[in-house]
Amino acid sequence: MPLTLATWNINSVRLRMPLVEKFLDQWQPDILCLQETKCPNDQFPSSPLNARGYVHQAIHGQKGYHGVAILSKIPLDDHTKRDYCNVGDSRHVSALFKVNGRTIRLHNFYVPAGGDEPDRAINPKFGHKLDFIEEMKHLDAEGEAETSSILVGDLNIAPYENDVWSHKQLLKIVSHTPVETEGLKEVMARGKWLDLIRHRTPEPEKIYTWWSYRSANWQLADKGRRLDHIWSSADLGPHLTSTEIVREARGWDRPSDHVPVIIKLDI
């Protein structure tokens, strides 16, 4: 049975709901995970999603900041939310779903961006990010019996050299500093996670999912970073049939600075 799953940092779901609708109409994933929804749960724009068949929703939002949501055509069960770093942010939600008799735990994350200065002594936001990643090291892809796992989201780290436009120039830039990239790789290694995008498109091919608003011509400069990820437990690797980065979405009207990332599995 085919399964299509997408993740997208939408940077305000109410502001960019027309883009969400456009994406769903054209790509029609079975499940869409959103980050940075910036919306309290009671104001989440569910009606246009329900009309398109995404009636199963696990939402964890807050006013003005952060926020994550799982929107699904497939029934969701056992919604959970974890307050990483115990600061009250809405940065994680998970749920169970079943495909062709297989149970899958889906985690949706929005990792802190970390501010501009990669020094926790003078930048508490960077310290928060490092602490968040440290907690994620305890998340095991094989932690639930007879359950596969998928982890998606804006992890705000480009872990490999070719996940950024210039490895050398970004080594001291937040999102690609060694302490961050090594930390995220340890999350993967300890938790036995498989990076599905790199599994399908290994290094040294460049992959980007984010382009800064600060660039006057993002497409011409093409100074991107791969900040958005889809991982899974190793047992799902053989079922991966395709991946896609919807680069064109960065050029849509009033876009997010991130674009959708899609995987297809045959289960």
Image (cartoon, helix red, strand yellow):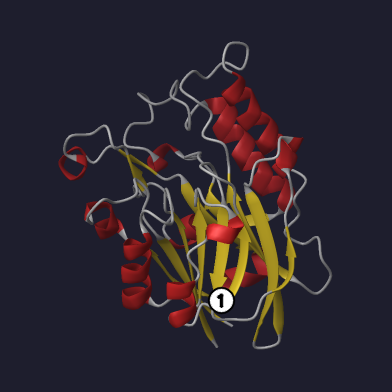
Outermost residue on the right side: it is 145
Q: Is residue 128 above or below residue 107?
A: above
Q: Is residue 170 above or below residue 77?
A: above
- Percent of width and height locating residue 165: 32, 36
- Percent of width and height locating residue 57: 60, 70
Left of 204 or right of it: where is 63?
Answer: right
Left of 177 or right of it: where is 61?
Answer: right
Q: Is residue 72 above or below residue 261?
A: below
- Percent of width and height locating residue 249: 28, 58
- Percent of width and height locating residue 130: 64, 29
Front-most of 218 and 43? 43
Outermost residue on the top side: it is 122
**Category of crowding for the residue at label 1, using alpha-carbon neighbours closer than 10 angstroms: few (below 14), some (14–19), many (at least 20):** some
Front-most of 241 and 153? 153
The answer to which image quadrant residue 102 occupies is bottom right
Using the rendered image of the protein, determine whether residue 195 is visible from the camera's viewpoint. Answer: no
Using the rendered image of the protein, determine whether residue 234 is visible from the camera's viewpoint. Answer: yes
Residue at (56%, 50%) from the top-left corner? 67
Quadrant for the N terminus, please. Answer: bottom right
Left of 195 or right of it: where is 22?
Answer: left
Residue at (61%, 20%) from the top-left corner? 124
Residue at (29%, 51%) from the top-left corner? 255
Quadrant for the C terminus, please. Answer: bottom right
Give, as a three-letter code, the residue at label 1: His
Front-most of 253 and 127? 253
Residue that numbered label 1 is attached to: 239
Residue at (59%, 60%) from the top-left corner? 42
Dot 1: element: helix
Left of 254 or right of it: where is 203?
Answer: right
